[in-house]
Image (tube, rainbow, N blue to C red):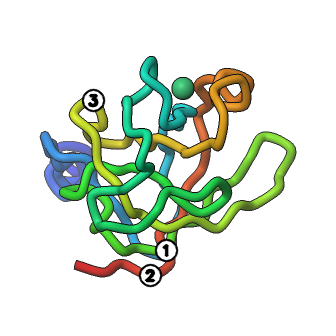
Amino acid sequence: MAVFAAVLLLPKLQIDAKPKIFYGTTNEFTVYGYCACKKCCDKSDKLTYTETTALQDRTIAVDPSVIPLGSTVLIYYEDSLIGIYQAEDIGGDIKGNTIDMYFENHSDALDWGINDCDVVIVDAKG
Ligand SMILES: [Zn+2]
């Protein structure tokens, strides 16, 4: 009887269709490299959705329902370096815990490829 009561007292697991983002804490994202070329997004003017000019080491594209546009985002690399990025752009394929990281040229975007990274949203605008 005591065991049965203990099971009932366990917190209920929350099943949530939407990814949960915790500001200031670590979240895992899949980070893709992209550039402005025809293969990636075909935007020779490099103009982002928020009307900034895309810049390497600053611009990331996000799902704005997960990371509000204008947010400052820390991305931890595999070698424990940290990059500081701005959520400035969106994209049709960027859904949920997915980030596109902007590079000035296609070969650098390919070099980055696809990486699972720990991400901390330090300043959420929106
Ligand atoms: Zn490209």
Quadrant for residue 119, please give it: bottom right
Q: Which quarter shows the N terminus?
A: top left
In the image, residue 89 above or below residue 122: above
Task: Identify the residue shown where x is 58% and y is 34%.
Answer: 116
Task: Identify the residue shown where x is 23% and y is 51%.
Answer: 2
Answer with mark 3 or mark 1, whichever residue precedes in sequence: 1
Could you tell me residue 44's position as x and y percent?
43, 40
Query: Residue lying furthest right in this view?
Result: 79
Residue type highlighted by circle 2? Asp
In the image, residue 31 above or below residue 114: below
**At numbered mark 3, what does the secondary structure look like: helix, strand or loop?**
loop
Q: Residues within 10 Å of mark 1 (few under 14, many from 20)?
A: many
Query: Residue lying furthest front in this view?
Result: 45
Between the C-alphas of marks 2 and 3, the distance is 24 Å
Could you tell me residue 31's position as x and y percent?
53, 37
Between the C-alphas of marks 3 and 1, the distance is 21 Å
Determine which of the numbered discs, if any, sits on residue 123 in the image.
Answer: 2
In the image, residue 115 above or below residue 20: above
Answer with mark 2 or mark 3, whichever residue precedes in sequence: 3
Q: Residues within 10 Å of mark 3 (few under 14, many from 20)?
A: few
The residue beneath circle 3 is 93
Quadrant for residue 93, please give it: top left
Could you tell me residue 70's position as x and y percent?
36, 74
The residue beneath circle 1 is 72
Whether residue 117 is visible, yes or no, is: yes
Could you tell me residue 32's position as x and y percent?
52, 32
Towards the viewer: 84 or 89:
89
Residue type highlighted by circle 1? Thr
Mark 1 touches mark 2? (CB < 8 Å):
yes
**At numbered mark 1, what does the secondary structure look like: helix, strand or loop?**
strand
Quadrant for residue 75, please give it: bottom right
Between the C-alphas of marks 1 and 2, the distance is 5 Å
